[in-house]
């Protein structure tokens, strides 16, 4: 029940959303349900600290046959942060998203995303994971295209086709893996793979298909093209939600998959993961530095930051995985907040083209500071969360003797700083260019709730930097759990 | 029988990839449908096919030889995948229709406005 509620909360919102016609009530209910979801996820933290891995067998069918919901420390961490991001973007959306979209189901479909995200973080078997991916993707397809502007439709066609192809890869991989091992339960599969270590090459086609599926979802190097082509088209509140949650689900699945399956063939996969992570970092950050649109720069940075998580996974030590988890959390917060600020700029000025914008710091120093915090957290300035994220990644890299990739990560940090300073200078600092026609602002009413959610997010980023130690400790415990898959297997299959 | 189905799946994948690489959006969408069906057949085939082996345990018997019956699980998985792809197909066609309404074109080359340069 304790895990099931995280599916039930968004589901009951979806049902109520169908019944209730008034958009004001829907909005209040959305806030209420998002709060409840966050509190529930938060309540899981002490439980998981005590029980280590929470396992719920749906319908009480025993593990390899029934549907298991599993939440270890890693899942709970992701659930909490996702719920937090969702809560704040919901508050933000009440003012940022225009009335027509709110009336036509903005909240409805964002709860669809929440349900899919929560489900994927807890899924204990592979096919269930696929189904939750689809729940999440279906809602995100609709959110991307909701409103039907030309740009949005173009973006959503690309987003949709490429994500569908990734799902096909994933499901084909599941089929082949089932054919070879005869199970879908993650723990059971991992156990079966452990006993078949001399014949792992047979499984590689299936594993590669699934790996490609996850990499497309997580926007890793050769598969990221859908992300920058579509993330800048929907309303900023939607982009913020996507940036915080969607690619991270792909990365979550990749980490889970690597620690349960791929590490059996470590020699092969480690190289692949390190190369893909490293190339994502470099290509993402270089592509970002050539862009002149606020949201496009940030979209490319998602790719680059995801690369950090993946190389930290590739180090495959306790320190490396700790760094990966910490960095993932930091990235979800900081990236979302950067998009929240972009949403405010868009509302005030009607455009996000850096060449047209200027002088925003004078307009509102508070928003300027909020951007400063999130941008320089992404770049890795000391008191903020990004500093510890990068520090942990680099430290783990040096300890794991991966000097080259660590140097690449350092070098990428420099470029990140460059793009962030570019946005800062162009949007907030330079004088308003007078010779370029200015588009009309979208909405001039005060944006207190938008400000509120961004301030809370910024406080979380600062707090994560100032009180990094308890979070790192938690991440370390989670990383130790991830590195001993036998524990996961024991808990899920009930040997414990 | 496996070989026939395997070759058939390969053909379907080839058709799907060919369609996806076309310029017309409608053909791309058709390509996605073909690919999703080919994927369903992969699950079906990899679960092991068995002619006429209904997955029932005869009355009175405790166990049954797994080699004589077909595995019902892949079929359940395919059913789920079909339902999902049905929903997505409906949505993708609606999206295409709306896109055609707004722009009056089927041509993927007209989608360049949101690309990165």
Image (spheres, coloured by chain):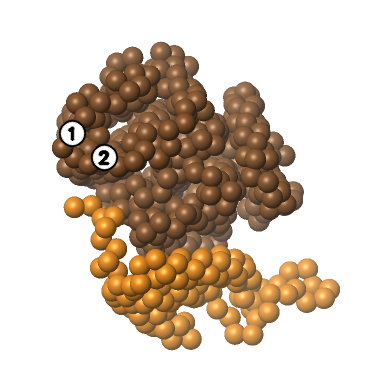
Chain colours: A brown, B orange
Can residue A392 be seen in this snapshot? no
Q: In the picture provided, is A491 more to the left or to the right than A169?
A: right
Can residue A27 be seen in this snapshot? yes
Label 1 marks a residue whose chain is A
- State whether residue A137 is above or below residue A307: below
Where is residue A316? Give x, y as percent. 35, 35
Label 2 marks a residue whose chain is A
Where is residue B76? Give x, y as percent. 62, 68
Give the residue displayed 15% in from the left and 37% down from the top. A435
- State whether residue A397 is above or below residue A278: above
Residue at label 1? A434
Instruction: Look at the numbered discs 1 and 2 and tell me whether their residues touch, using CB distance below 8 Å.
Output: no
Residue at label 2? A438
Where is residue A237? Give x, y as percent. 45, 40
- State whether residue A76 is above or below residue A151: above
**Badge 2 density bin: few <14, some 14–19, many ≥20, Cα 10 Å:** some
- State whether residue A429 is above or below residue B97: above
Camera-nearest residue between A367 and B24: A367
Give the residue displayed 68% in from the left and 79% down from the top. B54
Give the residue displayed 53% in from the left and 74% down from the top. B44
Where is residue A130? Give x, y as percent. 52, 56
Quarter of the image for residue A491 reads top right
Give the residue displayed 48% in from the left and 16% down from the top. A470
User: Could you say whether the residue bearing mark 2 is in a helix, strand or loop?
Assistant: loop
Quarter of the image for residue A390 reads top left
- Screen quadrant of the C terminus of chain A: top right
Counting labels gives 2
- Screen quadrant of the N terminus of chain A: top right
Quarter of the image for residue A44 reads top right
Residues at marks 1 and 2, CA–CA distance in whole angstroms:
9 Å
Q: In the picture provided, is A138 more to the left or to the right than B58?
A: left
């Amino acid at each position: 029940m304790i895990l099931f509620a995280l599916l039930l909360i968004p589901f009951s919102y979806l049902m109520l959303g169908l019944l209730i016609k008034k958009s004001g009530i829907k909005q209040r209910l959305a806030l209420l349900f998002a709060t409840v979801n966050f509190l529930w996820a938060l309540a899981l933290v002490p439980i998981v600290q005590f029980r280590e891995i929470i396992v719920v067998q749906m319908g009480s069918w025993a593990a390899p046959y029934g549907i298991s919901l599993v939440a270890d420390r890693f899942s709970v961490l992701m659930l909490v942060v996702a719920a937090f991001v969702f809560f704040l973007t919901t508050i933000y959306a009440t003012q940022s998203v225009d009335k027509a979209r709110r009336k036509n189901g903005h909240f409805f479909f964002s709860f669809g995303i929440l349900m899919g995200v929560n489900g994927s973080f807890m899924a204990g078997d592979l096919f269930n994971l696929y189904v939750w991916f689809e729940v999440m993707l279906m809602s995100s397809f609709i959110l991307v295209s909701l409103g039907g502007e030309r740009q949005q439709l173009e973006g959503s066609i690309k987003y949709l086709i490429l994500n569908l192809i990734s799902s096909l890869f994933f499901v084909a991989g599941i089929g082949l893996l089932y054919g070879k091992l005869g199970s879908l339960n993650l723990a059971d599969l991992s156990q079966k793979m452990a006993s078949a270590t001399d014949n792992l090459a047979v499984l590689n086609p299936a594993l590669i298909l699934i790996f490609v599926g996850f990499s497309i979802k997580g926007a890793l190097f050769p598969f990221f093209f859908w992300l920058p082509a579509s993330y800048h088209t929907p309303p900023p509140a939607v982009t913020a939600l996507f940036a915080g949650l969607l690619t991270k689900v792909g990365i979550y699945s990749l980490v889970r998959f690597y620690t349960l399956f791929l590490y059996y063939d470590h020699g092969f996969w480690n190289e692949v993961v390190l190369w893909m992570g490293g190339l994502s970092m470099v290509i993402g950050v270089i592509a970002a530095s050539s862009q002149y649109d606020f949201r496009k720069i940030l979209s490319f940075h998602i790719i680059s930051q995801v690369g950090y998580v993946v190389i930290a996974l590739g180090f495959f030590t306790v320190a490396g995985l700790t760094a990966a988890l910490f960095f993932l959390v930091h990235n979800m917060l900081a990236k979302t907040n950067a998009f929240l600020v972009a949403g405010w700029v868009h509302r005030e000025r009607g455009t996000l083209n850096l060449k047209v914008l200027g002088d925003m710091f004078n307009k509102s120093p508070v928003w300027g500071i909020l951007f400063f915090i999130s941008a320089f957290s992404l770049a890795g300035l000391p008191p903020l969360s990004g500093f510890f994220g990068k520090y942990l990644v680099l430290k783990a890299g040096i300890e794991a003797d991966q000097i080259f990739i660590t140097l690449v990560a350092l070098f990428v940090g420099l470029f990140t700083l460059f793009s962030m300073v570019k946005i800062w200078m162009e949007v907030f600092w330079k004088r308003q260019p007078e010779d370029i026609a200015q588009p009309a602002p979208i909405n001039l009413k005060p944006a207190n709730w938008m400000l509120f959610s961004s301030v809370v997010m910024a406080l979380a980023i600062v707090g994560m930097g100032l009180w990094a130690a308890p979070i790192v400790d938690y991440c370390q415990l989670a990383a130790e759990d991830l590195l001993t898959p036998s524990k996961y297997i024991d808990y899920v299959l009930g040997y414990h | 029988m496996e070989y026939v189905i395997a070759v058939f799946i390969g053909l379907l994948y080839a058709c799907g990839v060919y369609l996806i690489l076309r310029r017309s959006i409608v053909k791309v969408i058709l390509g996605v449908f073909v690919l999703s069906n080919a994927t369903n057949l992969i699950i079906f085939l990899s679960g092991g096919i068995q002619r006429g082996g209904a997955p029932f345990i005869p009355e009175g018997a405790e166990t049954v030889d797994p080699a004589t019956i077909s595995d019902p699980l892949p079929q359940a998985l395919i059913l789920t995948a079909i339902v999902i792809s049905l929903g997505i197909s409906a949505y993708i066609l609606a999206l295409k229709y709306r896109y055609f309404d707004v722009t009056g074109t089927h041509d993927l080359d007209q989608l360049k406005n949101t690309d990165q340069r």
